[in-house]
Image (tube, helix red, strand yellow):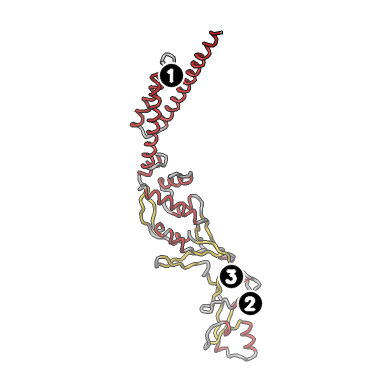
Amino acid sequence: MNLSKHQKTTIRKIFLGEIYDITSYLKYFNLGTEVRFDKDSIEDSFDKDNLPKKYYYHSLVKRKPSNMLTEAEYLQKLQNGELDPSHYTESTLRLSYNTGIKQETWEGQKFTLNFYEGVYIANSFTDILEFLMIWQFLKSEMLILEVPQDFSPKVLGLFYTKTTLYRDDSMPIETRIRNIDYKDFTYDDQYYLNSNYTLSHEHCLMCKEYLDKRICPSTRLGLFIKKRFKTYEEETQKKALFVAWLAIFVSIALTFLPHLHKEENPNLDAITQDIEDIENSIDSSDLYEDITKKLDSIIEKLNEIDSKLSSNRLQDTTTPLSESN
């Protein structure tokens, strides 16, 4: 697997224990945002809102918009003698936090996420998938262990996505009154927010098997990093291919080297020694830097020999012509 620089850094941090689950990965690379609603600002907006805060309803009728009286309407009817105050109940409108404090259900359990206290959210679901690809790769190569950890509702927070809320401050009071929850006389905080966040259950399901687990690095992971992020299979294939090409090169070199005159080519002894060193390195080393340097040295010396031979052939060709003249 060809790993990017970012992926290699991630694997190193996994080995060091600095990255061990989705949350730690996002926080280490600053791939998330702490979203916090301003509760004081919302409550201040509610207090300053000209929406009526007191309502009256007849004790014997169902509470619904058509049966509700605002404080101004109630006082007017009371002054006109149109109602008996003993039959009416007063309720004061309160602000609810249904949008800012969310109740979520996951795997049969209910969790609360409070955006007024702050919820850490991934900037992009693609970033989570990128990490899980690395996780799965290391797992498939048996370089890490998965261990269970307690599920935290904060993990669900990672999968929220931002949505825009439409606010129409010019909406008539009569229309806005219909948005009151008459069961408990509350007005939702969403009417004072410009944006909302919605949990993506689809993304949660896609990552389900990772949400209550953490990574435990093995000693093999350190060896994998030391071997320049090459798996055992990749190392074996690379070595086999390298040895095959080297065998071809050595065979060709040994074919014509005996036909050259050592006294005319002092590089022959050095080339022969380089070839012997390479043959010994094949079985004794997993590293290729030394072998590559030897090959470069051989090629350079062979080029010098070829140049000298070409010069000799040119002299052999031109000498008879000069003698005939």
Residue at x 38%, y 24% (from the top left corner): 255
Q: Quadrant of the C terminus?
A: top right
Could you classify mark 3 by the number of other residues whose Cα lies within 10 Å: few (under 14), some (14-19), or many (20 or more)?
some
Residue at x 53%, y 79% (from the top left corner): 182
Can you identify the residue that label 1 sits on? 267
Label 2–label 1 contact, CB within 8 A: no
Closest to the camera, between mark 2 and mark 1, is 1
* Res. 21 visible in picture: yes
Instruction: Please state the horizontal and vertical placement of residue 99, each as a whole percent of the image.
Output: 53, 68
Label 2–label 3 contact, CB within 8 A: no
Can you identify the residue that label 3 sits on? 191
Q: Quadrant of the N terminus?
A: top left
Asked if 172 appears above or below 13 in the picture, the reply is: below
Toward the right, the furthest residue is 170
Name the residue type under label 1.
Answer: Asn
Tag 3 secondary structure: helix
2 or 1: tag closer to the N-terminus = 2
Could you classify mark 2 by the number of other residues whose Cα lies within 10 Å: few (under 14), some (14-19), or many (20 or more)?
few
Name the residue type under label 3.
Answer: Tyr
Instruction: Please state the horizontal and vertical placement of residue 123, each as a whole percent of the image.
Output: 52, 56
Residue at x 63%, y 84% (from the top left corner): 73
Q: Nearer the viewer, residue 311 or 67?
A: 311
Asked if 188 appears above or below 314 in the picture, the reply is: below
Can you identify the residue that label 2 sits on? 173
